[in-house]
Image (spheres, grey):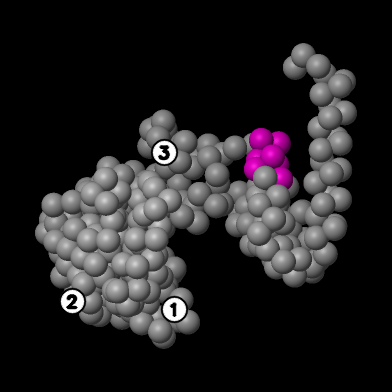
Amino acid sequence: LLGSDAACLADNAASLARLNPPGIDLNFGCPAKVVNRHGGGAALLDEPELVAQIVAAVRRAMPAHIPVSAKMRLGFKDDTRAEECAVAIAESGANELVVHARTQAHGYRPPAYWERIADVRAVVKIPVIANGEIWTVQDAARCRELSGCDALMLGRGMVQNPALARAVNVRVDETNEVTPVMDWASLLPLINDYWALVSKRLDKKSRTGRLKQWLNFLRRTYPEAESVYQDFRTCNDPARVDAWLMTLACADSTARVKNPHP
């Protein structure tokens, strides 16, 4: 949930509680200007008192068995109130906290200041999860070292390499400079599933843009994605994407017929 009105957020949380969700997460990290301009996301980190009111109101609105979590950045324009905001979140009833190790002013520019997450951990008693600029197994290891966090939240690194979480979890040798990736053939069914979701939920004008966003990330890892991205870079016709995926499906079916027992 994202917003700055504690009463409205509590009402929304109460409505969601009837669906028995696995949890409710509060967004105090969004750096988007349109969100911040209306007092939401990371802009709230200049008002720890309001942050506390929001968390407390949402916690009161939720049944005890449904956890309430929050995600924050280190601050809005600077990180001087990071610990204060974390304490406000923890003492108002949140069950866990994710910290993106940059301010709103930093945007997504590297580096992420993982050592500041350790400072936040020192002042709260709830679990803290580290986030920000984790692209490889080596990044994950370094983040854990500097932040002191065992748990990590993966964002764009996971979009670029969908196998990243698996690679981190198997604790690949930290001296290995290569992070294992899912091969392109294994990734294609996920792209197909993603396109099916996009086609179901978005209007035709928006669909290809969403796919191109993912391909733009994937091409950093997959040479095959570069070729597909260039083919669709100026395309806004969903039918072309449908045809491409159908071609892939037909090729896969043919391969299975030729090799029934791989």
* Amino acid type of the residue that numbered disc 2 sits on in the rendered structure: Glu
Q: Nearer the viewer, mark 2 or mark 3?
A: 2
Say which element carries label 1. helix
Mark 3 neighbour density, 10 Å: few (under 14) some (14–19) many (20 or more): many
Give the residue at x 25% y 80%.
46
Query: Distance from label 3 to label 1 (Cα)?
Result: 32 Å
Q: Is residue 80 visible?
A: no
Query: Distance from label 1 to label 2 (Cα)?
Result: 19 Å
Say which element carries label 3. helix
Image coordinates of residue 83 in percent, x first then y, are 17, 67
Q: Nearer the viewer, mark 3 or mark 1?
A: 1
The residue carrying mark 3 is 168
Q: Quadrant of residue 247?
A: top right
Q: Is residue 33 visible?
A: yes
Image coordinates of residue 172 in percent, x first then y, are 42, 33
The label shown at residue 227 is none
Mark 2 neighbour density, 10 Å: few (under 14) some (14–19) many (20 or more): some
Give the extent of the magenta segment: 184-192
Image coordinates of residue 256 in percent, x first then y, are 82, 24
Q: Quadrant of residue 121?
A: bottom left
Horizontal relation, residue 175 to residue 194: left or right: left
Give the residue at x 35% y 62%.
13
Q: Residue furthest bottom?
A: 37
The residue carrying mark 2 is 49
Quadrant including the C terminus = top right
* Amino acid type of the residue that numbered disc 1 sits on in the rendered structure: Val
Magenta span: chief secondary structure: helix
Which of pointers 3 and 1 lies earlier in the amino acid sequence? 1
Which of pointers 1 and 2 lies earlier in the amino acid sequence? 1
